[in-house]
Amino acid sequence: MYGQGIAKGMWVTIKHLVDTYLDDLKWWGRRYTDPAVFPERQGPHTRGVFTVQYPEEKLPMPERFRFTPFLVVNDPDAPEHPSHIWCTSCGICAKVCPPQCIWIMRGVHSDTGRPIPEPAEFYIDIDVCMNCGYCAEFCPFDAIKMDHNYELASYDRTAHHIHDLARLSKPVSYWEHIAPTLAANERAAREAEAARKAARKKSAPAKQQDDAK
Ligand code: SF4
Ligand code: SF4
C-alpha cells in the first residue's frame, strides 16, 4: 500500500522515542554511574536510544587505537631499564616521522660532556602529528608508544600542544594497562632476547678456550 513504508519507519522512530524514556526510568540515577549499564545499552537487546552519550559515556578503545605518542619510562617501584627513560635518543623516530614533528636533543654526561644514550629534550608537536604510529613502529627499544587519550583539546595551541619530555613520559605500567596483549608480547620478546644474550655471553669464554688450543 502506498505510504506503508513511511508509516513503518515513523512507528520505529516513535517506538525508540518512547523506549528511550522507559529506559531512563529503568536506569534512574544509575545511567552514568553504574559500569554495568553501558555494555547493556550497547548490547543487542537494548531499547530506546543506543547512541553514546559522550562525554558522560565513552566507548572502550581497542588496544591498537593510536592517538598521540608518549615515551615509556621505568615504573618507580620496579625499575626495569638501566636508565629511567627507555629512549636512547637514537633519532630513528624523528627520521621516519612523515610530517617531521619530533625534535630531540641528545643528553651529555655532566662531567665529561660526552653524549649519553638518553634525551636531554624531546618535543612532539601534536597539532602536526598525524597519528600514523610510525615512530612507535620503528623504535628499536619499545620506548615510544601510541597513547589512547584523545581528550587533548585546549584554548592554547602554542605551549599546550607542544608536548615536552615531562608531559610525554609515562610509566611502562600505563602501557601495560592500555594495551595488555601488545605489552605482554613485547615483554616476552625482550626477555627472550635477554636470555639469548646471556647464553651467548656464557658460551663466549668456552669458545675462546677452544680457539686457543
Ligand atoms: S626511536 Fe625510540 S629510542 Fe630512538 S629516539 Fe625515538 S623514541 Fe628514542
Ligand atoms: S605518530 Fe606519526 S606523525 Fe605522529 S609523531 Fe609519530 S611518526 Fe610522527
Image (cartoon, helix red, strand yellow):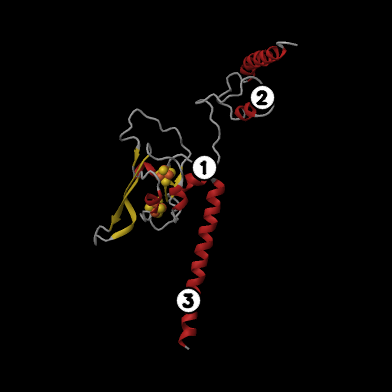
Under tag 3, what secondary structure?
helix
- x, y percent for residue 145: 45, 47
Residue type highlighted by circle 3: Ala
Residue type highlighted by circle 2: Thr
Determine if residue 197 is in view: yes
Disc 3 crowd, CA 10 A, few/some/many (<14, 14-19, 20+): few
- x, y percent for residue 72: 43, 49
Quote the CA–CA distance across marks 3 and 1.
40 Å
Determine if residue 70 is in view: no
In the image, is residue 50 above or below residue 143?
A: above
Disc 1 crowd, CA 10 A, few/some/many (<14, 14-19, 20+): some
Q: Which residue is drawn at the image coordinates 58% and 27% (left, top)?
A: 34
Residue identified by numbered label 2: 46
Point out which mark residue 178 bears: 1
- Asked whether disc 3 touches disc 1, contact meaning CB atoms under 8 Å apart, the reply is no
Point out which mark residue 204 bears: 3
- x, y percent for residue 184: 55, 51
Quote the CA–CA distance across marks 2 and 1.
27 Å
> N-terminal of the two: label 3 or label 2?
2
Under tag 1, what secondary structure?
helix
In the image, is residue 156 above or below residue 134?
A: above
Residue type highlighted by circle 1: Ile
Point out which mark residue 26 bears: none
Quote the CA–CA distance across marks 3 and 2.
65 Å
- x, y percent for residue 118: 34, 55
